[in-house]
Image: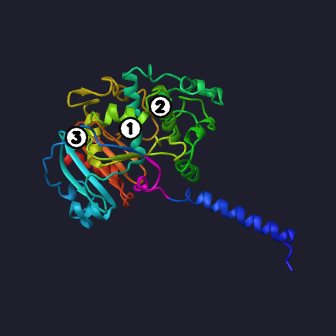
């Protein structure tokens, strides 16, 4: 005789099923992002340049660690290689006068292999904006978002400009650091364009600096829409990647197999030696081997302190500018878990550190000190 399922049992079964679905749905959201995510999630292939142009190499030994680490750390790590290995570093490249003078690849990553840059990606997107302006796809940074998106829900979007987005002054109600679960949800969002239409404001655009990845995502979507029939990653390859002679395969993480929206805020997976070429272009005001890839006055915008954000470090177009030293021009791009590209323009030195995590290290002062002593 078949047993009847009581209403209580039925409710219990339904609750268990619902909880199972919720756990399965959010299990990915609860996972901490990794520099190796490009190998496991949907991404777009970026092939090497037509003509490969490696940076010249003039190898030297790094200065003794007591010249760029604090005293306690220098005693613990008397040799640079030992320090890099024990701090979860996977790639460490030093460029001086446009030549690689030091390189190390550790902890499972080999030369030429790509890892995810996370928010270092943002400086590529702001560079693409400069290129799109130079190529007249976009008139200027003060164009409102509504020129590129139709039917946005809030009237505030009419006052939100590309400049606000690249300066993290959108006023959107999004908290990168205060709501970690929200940040993880955004990282695993399956339709990033949809998230733009769901965005709301908590302050007026242009009023307040607040670091948030959704700003760069919207900026990337605006550039994509401005290009019309030209695909943005094709434009990226043609306008930047190919011009720099990038030698390694790269990937740009996408939100899903169905929607295929690039994660403009942090999805670029590339090698450290190719990242160094981008740094060389930046240090020469957007010029690379006699080719002016960015507008000549593009970085004058960051030199005008009236336009820099005053809170904490000065932030401009994805870069953080040194506020602790008036005698040198030092700035850096930073990504989750210690992905850093530091540029000391005064010394003509670029240092790239990529790693599985921060390794318990505050990298900025160490890299700045090293950039002054190599």
Q: Provide the secondary structure element on which disc 3 rests.
A: loop
Would residue 315 be seen by someone viewing this image from the given angle?
no
x%, y% of residue 31? 52, 59
Picture layout, residue 114 above or below residue 12: above
User: What mark, if any, has residue 224 been given in the picture?
Assistant: 2
Residue holding disc 3: 52
Name which residue lies at 81% across and 66% down.
11
**Residue at label 1?**
123
Queried whether the magenta region covers residue 40, the answer comes back as yes
Confirm whether the magenta stretch covers residue 284.
Answer: no
Badge 2 density bin: few <14, some 14–19, many ≥20, Cα 10 Å: many
Whether residue 196 sits left or right of residue 164 in the image: it is right
- 172 displayed left or right of 349: right
Give the residue furthest to the front.
1
Q: Is residue 207 left or right of residue 36?
A: right
Residue drawn at x 23%, y 56% is: 104
Residue at (44% x, 32% y) in the render? 231
* Span colored in magenta: 32-43
Give the camera-side residue of 166 and 22.
Answer: 22
Residue 157: percent from left, percent from top: 60, 28
| Marks 1 and 2, the one that precedes in the sequence | 1
Alpha-carbon distance for marks 1 and 2? 16 Å
**Mark 1: which secondary structure?**
helix
Specify which label sits upstream in the sequence, 1 or 3. 3
Number of callouts? 3
């Amino acid at each position: 005789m078949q047993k009847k399922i009581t209403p209580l049992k039925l409710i219990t079964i339904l609750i268990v099923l619902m909880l199972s679905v919720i756990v399965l749905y959010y299990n990915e959201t609860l996972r901490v992002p990794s520099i190796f995510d490009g190998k496991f999630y949907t991404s777009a292939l970026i092939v090497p340049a037509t003509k490969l142009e490696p940076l010249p190499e003039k190898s030297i030994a790094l200065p003794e660690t007591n010249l760029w680490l604090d005293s306690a750390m220098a005693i613990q790590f008397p040799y640079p290689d030992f320090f890099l290995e024990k701090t979860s570093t996977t790639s460490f490249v030093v460029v001086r006068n446009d030549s690689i003078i030091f390189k190390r690849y550790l902890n499972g990553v080999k030369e030429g292999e790509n890892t995810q840059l996370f928010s270092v990606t943002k400086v590529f997107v702001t560079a693409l904006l400069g290129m799109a302006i130079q190529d007249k796809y976009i008139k200027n940074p003060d164009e409102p978002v509504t020129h590129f998106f139709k039917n946005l829900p809030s009237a505030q979007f009419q006052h939100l400009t590309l400049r606000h987005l690249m300066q993290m002054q959108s006023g959107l109600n999004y908290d990168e650091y205060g709501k970690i679960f929200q940040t993880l949800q955004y990282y695993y969002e399956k339709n990033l364009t949809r998230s733009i239409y769901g965005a709301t404001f908590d302050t007026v655009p242009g009023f307040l600096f607040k670091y948030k990845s959704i700003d760069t995502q919207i900026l990337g979507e605006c550039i994509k829409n401005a290009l019309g029939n030209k695909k943005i990653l094709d434009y990226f390859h043609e306008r930047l990647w190919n011009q720099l002679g990038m030698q390694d395969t790269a990937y740009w993480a996408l939100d899903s197999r169905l929607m295929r929206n690039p994660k403009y805020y942090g999805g670029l997976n590339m090698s450290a030696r190719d990242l160094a070429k981008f740094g060389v272009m930046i240090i020469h005001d957007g010029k690379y081997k006699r080719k002016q890839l960015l507008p000549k006055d593009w970085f004058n915008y960051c030199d005008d302190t009236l336009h820099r954000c005053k809170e904490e470090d000065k932030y401009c177009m994805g870069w953080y500018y040194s506020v602790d030293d008036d005698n040198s021009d030092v700035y850096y791009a930073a990504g989750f878990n210690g992905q850093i590209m530091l540029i000391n323009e005064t010394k003509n030195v670029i240092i790239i550190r990529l790693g599985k995590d921060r390794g318990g290290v505050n990298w900025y002062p160490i890299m700045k000190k090293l950039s002054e002593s190599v």
